[in-house]
Amino acid sequence: MTTSRCDVLVVGGGPAGLIAAREVASSAPDLDVMLLERDRAIGAPVRCGEGVGHAGIADFMDPVDAPWVSRRITRVVFVAPDGTQVRVAEGDVGYVLDRSRFEPAIAEEAGRSGAEIVIGTEATSVARTDYGWRVATRGPAGAGTIDARLIIAADGVESMVGRWAGLDTRVPSRDMESCAQYVVAGIAFDPDAIYLHFGSDIAPGGYAWVFPKAVGVANVGLGVVALRAEHGRSARAYLDRYLESYFPTGVRTGYTVGGVIVSTTLARTVTDGMILCGDAAHMINPLSGGGIVNAMKSGRLAAHVAVDAVRTGDASAGRLERYHGEWMRLLGDDHVRFYRIKEALGKFDDAFFDHLARSVNGIPEHRRTLGRIFARALVRHPALFPVVAKYFV
Ligand SMILES: Cc1cc2nc3c(=O)[nH]c(=O)nc-3n(C[C@H](O)[C@H](O)[C@H](O)COP(=O)(O)OP(=O)(O)OC[C@H]3O[C@@H](n4cnc5c(N)ncnc54)[C@H](O)[C@@H]3O)c2cc1C
């Protein structure tokens, strides 16, 4: 049995946890910070489309010529159910990452700043003590315990740590997307563009994506809301059908599945001595399903609130509540609006999106802003007005 003690214990070595560990270690070198990752490698296996926006990622790491970028993206193409393509962005749109190198790069920065990164070690339960929390662990050397003043729970979509501490982390099934993705080689597409393909036959409740990794190679995946799938058809079955239709000669060199929570932030993201961040706190953009940058932003926020709490000797839920408020102002309130838009859009059929795509193509490419696209949608469906009004309030 191994035992150890630290000020801040981060559970989970994804983008949220790694940024949290990096920020605690760099902003408070006097505090002991430890990060546990149950997988045997940081950044692997990759269960992700790996797409991120330029501004979001550049806020944390310099993406220019970075070895963890697979592809720079300069265009976004929406594809309507009938195949009509709409180009909606041009310029420094974003990147398709190589997460197997990206996360180790953050881990290296965290480690250099003084965080202890422990791989192959899983948190298995938590219990409240006078010190803070006692965390039971299972690792290469067997069972152990870690005493921590404060826990940052960044344990992802299957999060258990918050639940063990009594927080309600359940996800309504209508807000859970099942995703499947292949890495596909030998296919033809614009390698500088990401494609988002909508349609009730393609991906009910979600969309299919083509995110370039290199010329001729892409992450091709889709997410479906299981409740909307025909006859319980799986995400993989939808994806196989998609590939047969659109990339029949593509060579599949990798496969992954995973869940994405397309909901709003948990009502409570803190309890005594504990802060939840990233997917564990349901901080994914419910419209796009993107969660990497959100996870990093919440990890940074969690780190700063955690340092303040440990320094002042007050890690009570009341003191940590500041984290929840700051997150809601930063992105959480936007997610409530995005969720409403998602709900409203979910009521329209494929014909609406086909018509909207053709109509938007009538707007010159350099003038296609989100506002103008909404305006076109409103002309056809005035019922969208209340939703859009809420979005802009
Ligand atoms: C198929 C798919 C495609 C996606 N595509 C995109 C995309 O293109 N762009 C985007 O922005 N987002 C995408 N996402 C979402 C994105 O992957 C997540 O939002 C993001 O990884 C969240 O980061 P996180 O740090 O909160 O959690 P994670 O990245 O899930 O990290 C959590 C970590 O905690 C570890 N862990 C869990 N439990 C324990 C425990 N008890 N003890 C120790 N360690 C533990 C896990 O092993 C994991 O490494 C996609 C998701 C899926 C499933």
Image (cartoon, rainbow, N blue to C red):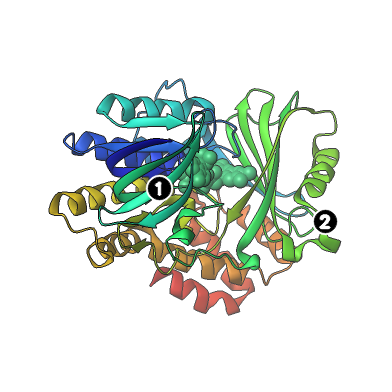
From the viewer's perspective, tell me whether residue 373 is left or right of residue 186.
left
Q: Secondary structure at mark 1?
A: strand
Question: Taking 55 as reference, is 84 above or below it?
Answer: below
Please state the total of marks drawn on the protein image. Answer: 2
**Residue at image point 38% right, 30% down:** 117
Q: Nearer the viewer, residue 342 or 240?
A: 240
Q: Nearer the viewer, residue 254 or 354?
A: 254
Q: Earlier in the sequence, mark 1 or mark 2?
A: 1
Tell me the quarter of the picture where residue 36 sits. Answer: top left
Residue 199, image x and y in percent?
A: 74, 57
Q: Amino acid at mark 1?
A: Val
Question: Taking 250 as reference, is 269 above or below it?
Answer: below
Camera-side mark, 1 or 2: 1
Q: Amino acid at mark 2?
A: Arg
Tell me the quarter of the picture where residue 39 sits. Answer: top right
Q: Nearer the viewer, residue 15 or 388?
A: 15
Q: Is mark 2 within 8 Å of ligand 1?
A: no
Query: In the rendered image, which residue does mark 2 sit on?
Result: 233
Numbered badge on residue 135: 1
Dot 1 surroundings within 10 Å: few (below 14), some, or many (20 or more)?
many
Question: Taking 357 as reference, is 375 above or below it?
Answer: below
- How far apart marks 1 and 2 lie (CA) works out to 39 Å
Residue 138, image x and y in percent?
A: 50, 38
C-beta proximity under 8 Å, tags 1 and 2: no
Q: Residue furthest left?
A: 312
